[in-house]
Image (cartoon, helix red, strand yellow):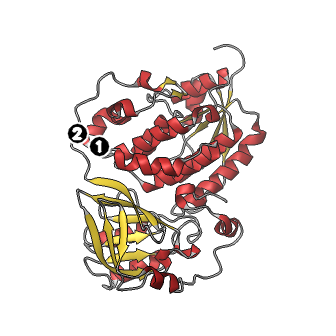
């Protein structure tokens, strides 16, 4: 490649060796240090913050392309949103997290091999492809299937919904409801099979369900093995949607094994801290349905990942025996049954904010239905839980007033 070096912007929150890789590949690295993100457990708010500050930092820098890299999903998807807004040729450096790598490759933003720096310099030199040319419904469908093939993670779907919204793709929530239940898990991240075959092995197992989209490194199928490796033992977790027909309530259920039904009495709390105290204090018994409201996009605000609650359940030996129902997010490594991203969220007056201790709930995992012994009229007559009027200040307060539902991306409305 001759002539002036292409200027590759590298927005980052933590230092990395990527500038050296870009220089060695023949480009001119332009490191752009971003202000620290908001707390990582508030995944949608952190993503929106990163997207805004990255866009502001990159816009005046006269860049030919972007190389985006981050270890946390919220930060990396925030950089992807900024790239869509700027619409500069963009390459994503493969992150350590397996589900992130698979989703970015399936979207067309990350090469499957290790040559991300060479790819970034090449797209900068050509001036294409640009993110808005790559990210459309076929690419998003690939990313959803890739995530499901690695056991699924509700946080991935929240971020992909935000990417769909930013790119102008329509119908993403409907796409999720079709693709999630019909895409079988292939492998667990960290399994011996995945360590041997990697993202390429997972994608080739999707077969004809994988769209042969254009990517930053050429057609997607060109980089995949011709024949899939031997199938591994399928992961024990599966994802499905459940909904209440009369109430309009819906949630994403992550359940181990072939379980056909989840039922029990509710123990209702309205913050993660309260739920942790109840678990640690012995107020939550095996077999309970632990309802944790107030953790949705507006309630957090910012959609917290309930890491503390997951750790408390694990430490108490309740991970398999207590079902969690929340408008927030489960951690990616939970092993028990969680019904998450329940909408409408409690802060907006959803049913999850009208449940009471002792209410019976049943989740029919065959038909995907939520059923309760409480009559609809009684639920509607109950006053929803009242939350404090204060939902943070400044950026967080503005977000809390307008945030979209989780599976619409949980961005600013």
Image location of residue 303, percent across then percent down: 53, 64
Position above or below: 259 against 272: above
The foreground one among 152 and 209 is: 209
Sequence order check, earlier mark of 2 and 1? 1
Relative height, residue 49 to residue 108 (above, below): below
Q: Looking at the image, which residue is at 30% across and 61% down?
A: 365
Q: How many marks?
A: 2
Look at the image and tell me whether residue 95 can be seen. no
Q: Quadrant of residue 96?
A: top left
The quadrant the C terminus occupies is: bottom right
- Which quadrant would the N terminus be assigned to in this image? top right
Instruction: Specify whether 321 is left or right of 392.
Output: left
| Within-10-Å neighbours for mark 1: few <14, some 14–19, many 20+ | many
The answer to which of 403 and 67 lies nearer the viewer is 403
123 to 84, vertically: above or below: above
Q: Looking at the image, which is closer to me, 280 or 337?
A: 337
Direction from residue 95 to residue 34 in the image, left or right: right
Pointer 1: what residue?
187
**Which type of secondary structure does the marked residue at label 1 adopt?**
loop
Q: Residue at x 54, y 63 (%)?
A: 42
Q: Residue at x 58, y 51 (%)?
A: 162
Percent x, y for residue 106?
46, 36
Q: Are marks 2 and 1 in contact (CB under 8 Å)?
A: yes
Can residue 26 be seen by looking at this rendering? yes
Q: Disc 2 designates what residue?
A: 232
Name the residue at 54% across, 34% down. 109
The quarter of the displayed image where residue 135 is located: top right
Label 2 to label 1, Cα distance in Å? 6 Å
Would residue 164 appear left or right of 225 to someone viewing this image? Answer: right
Location of residue 84 by image quarter: top right
x and y percentages locating residue 369 in the rendered image? 36, 65
Residue 99 x %, y %: 41, 45
């Amino acid at each position: 490649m001759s002539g002036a070096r292409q200027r590759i912007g590298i927005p980052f929150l933590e230092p990395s060796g990527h500038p050296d890789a870009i220089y060695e590949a023949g480009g001119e690295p332009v490191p752009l240090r971003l202000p620290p993100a908001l707390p990582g457990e508030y995944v949608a708010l952190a993503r929106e913050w990163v997207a805004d500050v990255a866009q502001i930092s990159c816009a005046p820098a006269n860049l030919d392309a972007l190389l985006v890299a981050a270890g946390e999903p919220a930060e990396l998807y925030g950089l992807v949103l900024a790239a869509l807004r700027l619409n500069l040729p963009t390459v994503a450096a493969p992150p350590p997290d397996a589900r992130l790598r698979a989703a970015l490759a399936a979207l067309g933003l990350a090469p499957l091999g290790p040559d991300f720096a060479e790819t970034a310099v090449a797209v900068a030199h050509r001036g294409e492809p640009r993110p808005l040319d790559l990210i459309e419904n076929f690419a998003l469908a690939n990313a959803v299937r890739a995530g499901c093939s690695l056991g699924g993670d509700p946080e991935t779907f929240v971020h992909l919904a935000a990417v769909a919204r930013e790119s102008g793709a329509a119908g993403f929530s409907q796409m999720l409801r079709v693709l999630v239940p019909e895409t079988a898990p292939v492998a667990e991240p960290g399994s011996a099979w995945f360590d041997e075959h990697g993202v390429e092995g997972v994608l080739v197992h999707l077969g004809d369900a994988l769209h042969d989209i254009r990517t930053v490194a050429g057609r997607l199928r060109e980089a995949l093995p011709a024949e899939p490796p031997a199938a591994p033992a399928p992961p024990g977790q599966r994802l499905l949607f459940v909904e209440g027909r009369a109430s309009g309530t819906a949630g994403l259920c992550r359940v181990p094994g072939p379980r056909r039904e989840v039922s029990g009495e509710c123990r209702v709390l309205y913050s993660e801290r309260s739920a942790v105290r109840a678990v640690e204090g012995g107020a939550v018994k095996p077999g309970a349905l632990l309802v944790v409201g107030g953790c949705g996009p507006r309630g957090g605000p910012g959609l917290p990942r309930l890491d503390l609650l997951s750790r408390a359940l694990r430490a108490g030996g309740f991970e398999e025996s207590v079902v969690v129902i929340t408008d927030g997010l489960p951690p990616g490594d939970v092993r028990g049954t969680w019904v998450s991203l329940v909408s409408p969220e409690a802060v907006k007056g959803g049913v999850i904010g009208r449940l009471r201790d002792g209410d019976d709930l049943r989740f029919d995992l065959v038909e995907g239905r939520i059923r309760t012994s409480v009559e609809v009229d009684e639920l509607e007559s109950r006053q929803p839980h009242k939350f404090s009027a204060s939902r943070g200040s400044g950026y967080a307060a503005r977000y809390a007033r307008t945030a979209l539902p989780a599976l619409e991306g949980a961005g600013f409305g």
